[in-house]
Image (cartoon, rainbow, N blue to C red):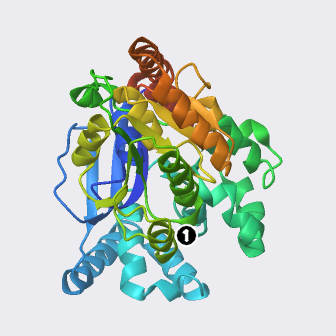
Amino acid sequence: MGEKIKIAIYTGSFPAPVFIENLINAISKYPIEIYIFGKKSGPYNVRDKNILFFPTPNSRYFLFIFVFKEMIRLFIKNPKMWYNLVCFYLDSTIYKMSGFFNWWGKVLPIVNNPPDIFHIQWAKSLTTWHFLKDIIGVKLVLSLRGAHINYSPLADESLAMQYRTLFPRVDAFHAVSDAIAKETKKYLNVPKKIHTIYSACDIHYLQNFRKNNLNIDKQFRLVSIGRHHWKKGYNYAVSAVDKLVKNNIDIRYTIITKNEPSEEILYQVNELSLNNIIHFEHTNSQREIYKKMKSNDCLILPSVEEGIANVVLEAMAIGLPVISSNCGGMEEVIHDGINGFIFQNRNVDNLYNKIKELINLSKADKNKIAEKAMKSIQHNNSIEIVGDKMYQLYNSIVDK
């Protein structure tokens, strides 16, 4: 193609989540202009001249001025589109609920800087953005990740109906695993639109935190990382740790999260008298999380549901052994006993046995598993591989 493809991503905030930052990093090496929309919540360094970002102000006062200016700009540039957008807003009920200035502050920067493709990172967000296809003729790409596909529509029939109605309007789907692609077919009878491309992992950056020493001290240190939510399955990991302690295994378990632990998990830890064994830590720094990974002996992913957990990919790239439940697409990443360990979802005894198995391995065998884990991430999740596949996907729908 002669001109660069213009890809728009609404991140919600700057800096973007790791998934989006890695996606941006992966596709920025190609003849693509990347438009990033959202509210600025922290410092953001533009790494490449092909990356343009259009922040919406957080302040109500500056948001009012911003919307006023963007409205005038659209009216001068394209009065017909301005008229169509105003009519659309006045006719809709759902969009009015988000607030006049909030909605226009999100939408106007995109309409004034129209991309070729609008890449939506969460399935539930499709209800917010699908109208762009009619207003500016943009192509839609939707990433299929985790809860939004795995269980939200199962618990909410109205959401499932929205998916069945809106999914046919999407031009291409980016599934982070074959398992989640299979789930999507419940709401879409055009499977050829779904492309499995595993999440990107910034291996070069993660090498700064490479875990070279797998010598285990007397105390074995387990870590889990992720928000406190029932689907993360921390209660199963706590029960497994309790069983390890009762069998006189010296263990420490740390749960690192950005939000507060639930009352249920705190009660369970207290009831089992594990307050000196299980620790809760908070951090908003991704760099600090990687340092914590390096200082532990094993990452546990006890989740009930996932697409493919980014934290597992990162741990494997760092060289930290992983024990994961077989939820979602995790068995597509981890091959039990080869590059990590898989336990049966919700099975405390099985998790307990896998932890013991890892503890009892020789240093040479631990190193072998860590090395194979790093190689599998290099082969399937490197920035270069994911970027090439995403570029091919974008090209295919623009050509159509």
In this view of the protein, which residue sits in the foreground, 318 or 381? Answer: 318
Q: How many marks?
A: 1
- Identity of the residue drawn at 43% across and 78% down: 103
Q: Is residue 34 above or below residue 61?
A: above
Q: Which residue lies at the image location 56% right of the left edge and 56% below the top edge?
A: 239
Indicate whether 347 appears above or below 11.
above
Direction from residue 239 to residue 184 in the image, left or right: right
Give the image location of residue 158, x and y in percent: 75, 75
x, y percentage for residue 275?
37, 64
Residue 368 falls in image quadrant: top left
Q: Residue at x 46, y 38 (%)?
A: 312
Q: Position of residue 346 (x, y in %)?
A: 67, 52
Mark 1 falls on what kind of element?
A: helix
Q: Crowding at label 1, few (<14), some or many (≥20) Cα neighbours within 10 Å?
A: some
Q: Nearer the viewer, residue 81 or 349?
A: 349
Q: Position of residue 131 (x, y in %)?
A: 58, 67
Q: Is residue 64 left or right of residue 375?
A: left
Q: Examine the image and state in which quarter residue 137 appears.
A: bottom right
Taking 319 as reference, is 160 left or right? right
Q: Mark 1 — residue?
A: 128
Q: Quadrant of the C terminus?
A: top right
Res 206 seen here = yes
- Judge whether 49 appears above or below 259 on screen: above
Of 212 and 71, nearer the camera is: 212
Asked if one can make out residue 114 in the rendered structure from this viewpoint, the answer is: no
Q: Is 290 placed above or below 389 here?
A: below
Left or right side of 256 for 249: right
Kind of residue indicated by mark 1: Thr
